[in-house]
Image (tube, rainbow, N blue to C red):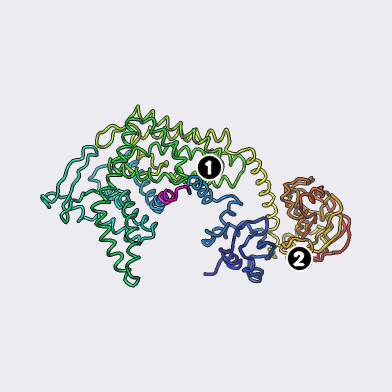
């Protein structure tokens, strides 16, 4: 398969690793490179889809694309090799921090002081993060099953073979969760992940489960009832030693502890076993050593730790439900950005495995929906303000939240970039927490064991989204609570805004710039393309039009070649043949008669098309777009018809000079390629309206 133009450009520029940053303007890609010496200039200049390649000082490089530059930029940014390219991802956000950089910055605030603690939380995060997709998929299946049962679409009894099959789909995820966690945790510690998964799988085999059968083993196995948890604890005598037997399905603490021990043993064995036989003997000894340790010590200890934490939190939820229900949604907005929420996620899974239900996810859902409500408020304002960039960001984040229960796109894409969001959102979290605390106390849940529990409970690990509302016991209490949290956050964002006055001013400037760039792109898009088949109708329609044989000077001054203007893109003729004029007057006029196709709001650029199809671009100064219209008094509007000599803009060129920009006014014929010839007249002094370009049709 042939390489795309985007891939070819990156290859010719020296590869993704040579790219420090990438942005684009109206017609060109702007690269900042590690080493400009790696660029294949000839390849770029002869590449289809590239109009020119211009080296600049300081390892900067411009590739001229024309009107399709925005699409080309998007194609390049979506190339797999650009995912980790220097500043490329940052450039994708128009120079702002990427989501990953926002995340890193937030976590850096709380990390770095205690190295082992940093490593611990990274270990937890990387053990769970790769399996979030399957957990999310399983939680949605659970939610839909519960919904269909409540609606009577599915008969919810054990004799329904179809229901049993569907349950097997999601139960497989949670039953074998310890193996998945062991795999990820081992991989994080640079241990063969299949080794970690195999050791954990040992504790979930039918042979291991059969050890709990006292009828089979007689006096070798003894069992006692655990009144607190409502479970049966069995102990078997193996090799003359007592081994506590547990159901490890769904357990997450045991694989985390096992993988940590495996890491020490594995790397220790690699130091003492010769390289030539490590493939055989490292796994052999590791399975025996860690397998025995896990069965006799690590497994029982992990179960005890998980159950103990669950009992403590259950006690708190039962005796101080108000504090618990309000604290969770207020803590989560700070735990998630720092990656400190993983222990709570592990506890949710342990609660379901040991208690048969979880009581943390209800209050957690309040925080999630307060977060999504804030994003909905941002979306409302972005639509009102015509902020396309934020509208796209907030739509994606809101969809991920409401349908998937994932808060990270909202957090890193919006909330942590605009700190005022948190002040509004926390009020929504607190309000929703109060509602779920009050209603949870007044209308407690009754779990499967018949126990009455204060608060909202669930028997499934579910990402708190719209789709998973049916998995919660006392569903209406949960629904009211999350609705309040969502509505309060959204209302506060909409009424009080999420941006500072400075950020709003910056937005207005950016929107004005984007509009100007779009107008220039639209004008430049047609420049390289000719369509002879359409020429006949056009000629007929303009048969009485006066032929444009000359293009006049738009401003009085000294005419120079495009080569001498100091702008390499114009000098490359990528935007057509033309001239530069060093102005001696402040009034810029129309160089031909025709219709204004483009009028930049900043007043620095104008595109005019004559009746016979000559397209002229007048660009006042170099990089003057950055002045945001200061010193430019625009006298016309897009779509307006002008005659040669009509005033387009009056410019305070002294201000342009003070701002550090060149006053040279550039003029090109954009569709030079469609004409027989364009001949410039240079090295002369002219008044506005004097001919400076001869046109041959």
Labels 1 and 2: the sequence-earlier one: 1
Circle 1 — which element? helix
Q: Is residue 549 left or right of residue 576?
A: right
Answer yes or no: do the residues labelled 1 and 2 have beta carbons within 8 Å? Answer: no
Figure check: 152 above or below 16: above
On the rendered image, what quadrant is the C terminus found in? Answer: bottom right
Q: Is residue 191 left or right of residue 602?
A: left
Around disc 2, counting alpha carbons within 10 Å, would you say few (fewer than 14), some (14 to 19), or many (20 or more)? some
Residue that appears at 66% across and 55% down: 25
Residue 114: x and y in percent read: 45, 48
Around disc 1, counting alpha carbons within 10 Å, would you say few (fewer than 14), some (14 to 19), or many (20 or more)? many
Circle 2 — which element? loop
Residue 643: x and y in percent read: 83, 51
Q: Is residue 252 left or right of residue 690?
A: left
Residue that appears at 17% across and 51% down: 236
Between 374 and 143, which is closer to the camera in this rendering?
374
- Magenta highlight range: 113-120
Residue 62 seen in the figure: no
The label number, if any, that marks residue 484 in the structure image: none
The label number, if any, that marks residue 415 in the structure image: 1
**Residue 459 location, quadrant:** top left
Q: Magenta residues: mostly which secondary structure?
A: helix
**Residue 312 location, quadrant:** top left
Q: Which residue is mark 2?
A: 675
Residue that appears at 17% across and 55% down: 238
């Amino acid at each position: 398969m042939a390489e795309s133009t985007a891939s070819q450009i990156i290859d010719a520029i020296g590869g993704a690793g040579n790219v420090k940053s990438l942005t684009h303007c109206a017609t060109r890609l702007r690269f900042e490179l590690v080493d400009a010496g790696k660029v294949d200039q000839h390849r770029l200049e002869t590449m289809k889809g590239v109009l020119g390649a211009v080296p600049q000082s300081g390892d900067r490089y411009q590739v001229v694309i024309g009107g399709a530059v925005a699409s080309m930029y998007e194609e390049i940014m979506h190339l797999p090799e650009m995912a980790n390219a220097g500043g490329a991802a940052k450039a994708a956000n128009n120079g702002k921090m990427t989501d990953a950089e926002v995340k890193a910055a937030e976590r850096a605030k709380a990390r770095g002081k205690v190295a082992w603690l940093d490593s611990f939380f990274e270990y937890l995060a990387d053990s769970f993060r790769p399996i979030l997709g399957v957990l999310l998929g399983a939680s949605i299946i659970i939610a839909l099953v519960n919904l269909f049962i409540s609606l009577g679409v599915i008969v919810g009894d054990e004799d329904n073979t179809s229901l049993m099959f569907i349950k097997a789909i999601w139960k497989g995820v949670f039953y074998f969760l310890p193996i998945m966690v062991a795999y990820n945790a081992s991989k994080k510690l640079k241990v063969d992940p299949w080794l970690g998964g195999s050791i954990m799988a040992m504790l979930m085999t039918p042979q291991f489960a059969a050890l709990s059968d006292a009828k089979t083993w007689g006096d070798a196995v003894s069992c006692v009832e655990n009144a607190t948890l409502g479970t049966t604890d069995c102990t078997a005598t193996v090799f003359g030693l007592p081994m506590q037997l547990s159901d490890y399905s769904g357990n997450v603490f045991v694989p985390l502890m096992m993988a940590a021990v495996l890491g020490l043993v594995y790397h220790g064995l690699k130091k003492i076993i010769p390289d030539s036989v490590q493939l055989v003997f490292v796994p052999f000894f590791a399975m025996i050593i860690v397998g025995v340790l896990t069965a006799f010590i690590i497994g029982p200890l992990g179960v005890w730790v998980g159950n103990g934490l669950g009992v403590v939190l259950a006690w708190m939820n039962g005796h101080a439900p108000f504090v618990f229900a309000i604290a969770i949604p207020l803590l989560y907005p700070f735990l998630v950005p720092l990656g400190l929420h993983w222990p709570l996620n592990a506890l949710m899974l342990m609660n379901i495995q040991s208690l048969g239900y979880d009581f943390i996810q209800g209050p957690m859902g309040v925080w999630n929906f307060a977060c999504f409500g804030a994003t909905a408020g941002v979306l409302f304002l972005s639509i009102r303000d015509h902020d396309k960039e934020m509208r796209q960001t907030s739509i994606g984040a809101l969809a991920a939240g409401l349908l998937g229960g994932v808060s990270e796109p909202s957090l890193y894409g919006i909330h942590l970039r605009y700190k005022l969001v948190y002040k509004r959102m926390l009020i929504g979290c607190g309000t929703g927490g109060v509602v779920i605390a009050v209603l949870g106390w007044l209308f407690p849940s009754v779990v499967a064991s018949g126990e009455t529990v204060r608060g909202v409970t669930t028997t499934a690990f579910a990402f708190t989204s719209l789709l998973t509302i049916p998995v919660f016991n006392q569903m209406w209490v949960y629904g009211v609570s999350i609705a309040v949290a969502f509505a309060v956050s959204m209302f506060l964002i909409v009424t009080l805004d999420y941006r500072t006055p400075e950020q709003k001013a910056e937005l207005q400037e950016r929107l004005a710039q984007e509009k100007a760039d779009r107008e220039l792109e639209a004008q430049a898009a047609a420049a390289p393309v000719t369509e002879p088949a359409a020429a006949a109708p056009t000629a007929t329609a303009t048969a009485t039009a006066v032929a444009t044989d000359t293009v006049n000077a738009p401003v009085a001054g000294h005419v120079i070649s495009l080569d001498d203007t100091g702008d390499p893109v114009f000098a490359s003729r990528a935007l057509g043949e033309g001239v530069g004029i060093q102005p001696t007057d402040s009034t810029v006029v129309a160089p031909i008669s025709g219709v204004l196709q483009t009028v930049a709001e900043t007043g620095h650029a104008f595109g005019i098309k004559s009746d016979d199809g000559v397209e002229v671009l007048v660009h006042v100064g170099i990089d003057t777009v950055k002045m945001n219209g200061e010193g430019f008094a625009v006298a016309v509007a897009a779509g307006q018809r002008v005659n040669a000599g009509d005033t387009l803009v009056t410019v305070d060129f002294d201000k342009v000079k003070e701002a550090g920009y060149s006053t040279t006014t550039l003029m090109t014929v954009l569709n030079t390629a469609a004409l027989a010839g364009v001949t410039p007249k240079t090295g002369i002094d002219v008044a506005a309206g004097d001919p400076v370009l001869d046109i041959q049709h």
